[in-house]
Amino acid sequence: MSEKRHGVCNLCEAICGLELTVEGRDVVGVRGNPDDPLSRGHICPKGVAIADVYADPDRLRRPVRRVGEGSGARWQEIGWDEAFDLVADNLARVIEEHGDDALGVYLGNPNAHSLGSMTHGTAMFKSFRTKNRYSATSVDQLPHQLVAHLMFGHQLFLPIPDIDRTQWFLVIGANPMASNGSLMTVPDFPRRVRDLRARGGRMIVLDPRRTETARVADEHHFVRPGTDAWVLLAMLHVLTTEQAPGRVPPVASYVDGLATVLDLVADFTPERAEAMSGLAADEIRRLARELAAADAGVVYSRIGVSAGPWGTVCQWAVNCLNILSGNLDRVGGAMFTSPAIDAVGTGLIGRGHHDAWRSRVRGLPETAGELPVSALREEIETPGDGQVRALLTVAGNPVLSTPDGARLDEALRGLDFMAAVDIYVNETTRHADVILPPTTALERDHYDLVFHLLAVRNTARFTPAVFEKDADQRHDWQIFREITLRTAARLSRKAPLKKRLVQRARLTASPTLLIGQLLRRGHSGVTLKKLRERPSGIDLGPLRGGQLPARLPSKGKRVDLAPALVVADVARLAAVPEPAGDQLVLIGRRHQQDCNSWMHNSQRLTKGRPRHQLLMNAADLAAREITDGARVRVTSRVGSVEVEVAASEDLMPGVVSLPHGYGHARDGVLMTRSREVPGVSVNDLTDPELLDVSGNAALNGVPVEVAPA
């Protein structure tokens, strides 16, 4: 007999509410929850497939250890106590023999989508004193977090576009029609765009590819990858030089550094931006003037910009455009959320910092306690004090998702020990000595600590587990607790007894208990009891303006328009020469059916037309005498791949595109029993030496050559 249960899709940032039809231990139907105040019944293909992860035959449910080496290796199930002891023994051994920094840790993207990882995983990683900390942040949104820290005083105090009330929406290097928003939790984006147009508003997209979002926009303009900074600075130039009465409002009294900004952008003219980007100077002027004149306008940029060579300058310029046009902290502009649990105000997530230490080999600065993941491979391979000899990964696949993945794949073979908290044997975890698999989304309680903080509407929702876990399964927070406590017990250096007791109590409390405590500390009136009574969620209303300067987390409640790090990088930008006319550059690509490097085990998501090809403008194909559908060789400084090419007028001339997350067969080893996803890994071409000043990898704008295979 079937029954209805509430669920949540936490596969991406949209956090859509679900209605599940369940028969026994099986999910037989999935639909969007129309009563969810944020997602409003929206669901995308990934949400429909969420039960595929729960029921996946490839998914690990019990710990396994690797027996043998190379092609003869096999996986053997072991008990939890044996697995925990194996991990703790070896992590402690490496730390005792070689020092704290001999342990490297890596957090993958799914950690932000797991309540247990947010409440207990961070505590585990803080317990290790290593400086070799890495995560997917530095191949994603690091510039946004660094700029928020420098300008506003906290790495997650991020302005969110008030899309439900804006009149003029400029989207740069983002594709929310496919992603459902990113650093802007915006489920049901298609209807929100229709509503924008119905009230007389407009959406303009700047992107080197005519994306799904560009197709529904009022305007789309090509911009050469890696040159967005010149366009944004030219828009600032227009705003700050055409100061007719009423055009540029004076900055608020709590904003510092306007004079420095005026000097910085003085020479970044629209004509210079046109030469760099390909976007006409007159169009740049028009966009800046429209932003200044709009009753409510907002500029939004995302991974196409942040994963570029000038991501930090770009995100700083976006904030400056929103501030100087009078749209920060204003209805319809760039606003700040008021979540029931304020991860910024409670100190649950640290403010962030920059350059407190540097990587051993290349001297790259840390940001918010993490080194750029582009440095991980060299820190494993290079001998000496602080060499990474053991690695712990959690829900990550850096071999597919970080630069020069092929060389990282080789480096992992040389580790003394590796452990992974993951539900799959993948390109990265296949090198682990032991894999500890946690429960999945439908088997654990959930509350979004991060994405309520980034949502376009203030809501709160707690979702109990749809299914009870089996007795021999473990939640991720239970795995983190055991690794932390057992490793600490084996180390000769002990923390003070009081600190150890507090840590044990903190790690023993369940995430749900901690959520109840955090809600009581807030000012929203929302309690865990109320959320249990209203499983679709509680609507706390639209984003609220007029919160600044009171809510600023910075000391003195000030906004710094001119952080020294950004000022220096803009000066460096000014000296960059114009791009060579015949140079091809590579960008990534996201599809709605994909979730980074996972979800490719789901038949319903991988069926249909192939999506793995290299996309290339027809004119570029003709210039190289390559036919549509041919097999080509794509070469960058670090590697080459072979793949089918498809002609596409959606690509700007001079730009080629490969999707992110493919390449699931390496060295002839198929990583899953399910359908093989064809294609190659774009990160066998991306270059670990191409970095933004924040340390974020420049995955877009990579110089490449394309020739017949």
Image (tube, rainbow, N blue to C red):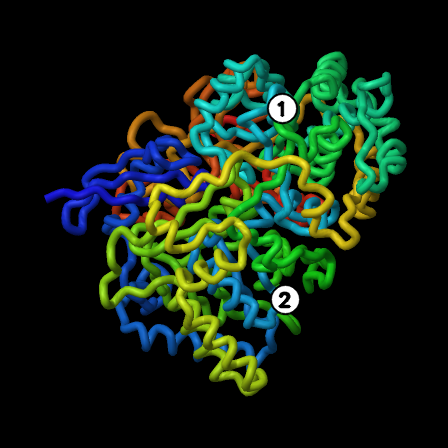
Could you tell me if the residues under marks 1 and 2 are in contact, i.e. CB atoms within 8 Å?
no
Going from the N terminus, do you reach mark 1 or mark 2 first? 2
Image location (x, y in percent) of residue 309:
68, 39
Q: Residues within 10 Å of mark 2 (few under 14, many from 20)?
A: many
Tell me residue 416's x, y (percent): 49, 71
Determine the CA span between mark 1 and mark 2: 39 Å
State how many labels appear.
2
- Residue name at image x 54 percent, y 15 percent: 199
Q: Quadrant of residue 248?
A: top right
Q: Secondary structure at mark 2?
A: loop
Q: Is residue 580 above or below residue 452?
A: above
Residue found at x 43% / y 56%: 115
Disc 1 marks a residue whose amino acid type is Leu
In this view of the protein, which residue sits in the foreground, 366 or 398?
A: 366
Q: Residue furthest left?
A: 1
Element under disc 1: strand
Q: Left or right: where does residue 672 sit relative to residue 376? A: left
**Quarter of the rendering occupied by the N terminus:** top left
Question: Whole-percent x and y of residue 134?
Answer: 57, 58
Residue identified by numbered label 1: 170
Nearest the eye: 226 or 383: 226
Which residue in the protein does label 2 denote? 131
